[in-house]
Image (cartoon, rainbow, N blue to C red):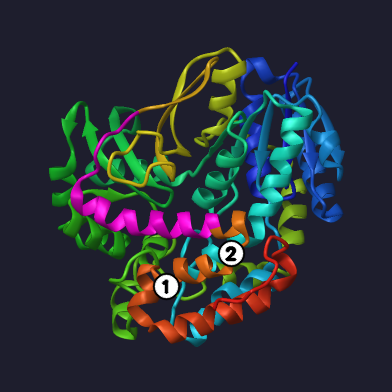
Amino acid sequence: MAKFAFIGAGSFGFTRTLVRDILTFDAFKDATIALMDIDETRLDYITRAVHKIVKAGNYGAKVISTSNRAEALEGADGVLCTILNGDVDVWRYDIEIPKTYGVDINVGDTRGPAGIFRALRTIPVMLDICADIEKYCPHAVFLNYTNPMAMLCRAMQSRFPALKISGLCHSVQGTAGMLARWIGARDEDITYTCAGINHQAFYIDYRWKGKDAYPLIREAMKDPAIYNEELVRNEMFLLLDYYPTESSGHNSEYNAWFRKRPDLIEQFCIHGTGWNPGAYAYILNEYQSRKGTWRTEIEDWLKEPTVDLSRGHEYAAYIFNAVFGDKTMFKFNGNVLNNGLIDNLPQGACVEVPVLASPHGFEAIQVGKLPDQIAALVHTSSICEELAVEASLSGDPRKVYQAIAFDPLTSAVLGIPEIKEMTAKMFKQNEGYLPQFLNFNLK
């Protein structure tokens, strides 16, 4: 029987969905589900939820609930990570400090000054998790959902090359489905090749029944309802000729075009009809508004008489099934090291490319050269991520300063002295969470 360890299991939505998906596979109906979290309240809630799913499906699965990571990992075949190192009262300053300098951030979990400091806080914890995996379940498949995806995977994969590690983001399949809807296609008739870096990947090929669908997408955007759904992303497509994977809100903070002036923010980042057009501090505000309601929402779900047991579209369960379930091969977009996979992005950096999961593990598929205009945008972000990861692994605060200085949005808004001052203030705010740095002297 397979064993799955959920590290940070208190992420109620993710864990509940992933457990449901795993148990839909015949090979995993009798699996052991080990739930681990350091928050006892959240751990209790997710344990009750998983028991409800097991009972509703009449599965033979066993559920373990623990705050001991070693106990959860011991003998695991699959590991999933959805941790957050620091509650909203910690990471709110990732958004609020840059705002005082004029850097307007929408989400801040991926790159830029907010994403970099989230990475610096989280990398030491992720490396500790990898060390435990190496000790307690060295052959396990480790799938990460924690952001910032690329920087975390880069650190883990470089320090623990023998482990089977990849990072997953549902924006790839989610956006592919959105584009299919726009042109009136069924998801199953769409094929694509998507490549770049996490949250900044592009469909370098997108086809409907084997034919190039980009002319249809361009035509669909003439409909104001479709254009207004994703203002930022649609403008990027009209410029770059290839469609990006992540929401308009996220994309607005990864480049210099949309958030450097109030009038641009008003024009492109406020009024879109998609799930996240790009308002300032969108996710921070969501977290703060739900602080007093999340328990009630979970308790309401636990009281519901029925459970939807249908399999969803997250990749994780399919990947596990391909590697050690019924061994049906599965292709997904994953985060892996760029060892000759994309020619014009930094070698050794973390890239998001097609990956084949099979009993052999993970086999990343070579993409070749990104279109020049895509590489020009993505290369800068990738270099900033490389600097930030190197800073965390070496304990060199100056590389953090340099990574933030080259961030496209930050450099469009601030001068060098302001960037240095802002970085120093963010170091001071986070000093209790950065054990890898002996000092915060930016020189």
User: Viewer-nearest of labels 2 and 1?
Assistant: 2
Question: Could you say whether the residue bearing mark 2 is in a helix, strand or loop?
Answer: loop
Residue 72 included in the magenta stretch of the image: no
Question: Could you say whether the residue bearing mark 1 is in a helix, strand or loop?
Answer: helix
Q: Residue at x 47, y 59 (%)?
A: 387
In the visual, does 343 lie left or right of 153?
A: left
Front residue of 274/332: it is 332
In the visual, does 198 lie left or right of 377?
A: right
Amino acid type, residue under disc 2 in the picture: Asp
Amino acid type, residue under disc 1 in the picture: Ala
Q: Is residue 298 above or below residue 267?
A: above
Quarter of the picture containing the N terminus is top right
Q: Name the residue under label 2.
A: 396
Residue 33 spot, x, y in % from top left = 77, 30
**Residue most toward the front?**
443
Span colored in magenta = 366-390
Give the numbered dot on residue 350: none
Q: Name the residue under label 1.
A: 405
Decide if residue 196 is in sight here.
Answer: yes
N-terminal-most mark, 2 or 1: 2
Q: Main secondary structure of the magenta part?
A: helix
Q: Is residue 307 above or below residue 275?
A: above
Local crowd size for mark 1, using a 10 Å CA cut-off: few (<14), some (14–19), many (≥20): many
Decide if residue 55 is in sight here.
Answer: no
Q: Which residue is drawn at 15% across and 58% down?
A: 222
Q: Is residue 284 above or below residue 344?
A: below
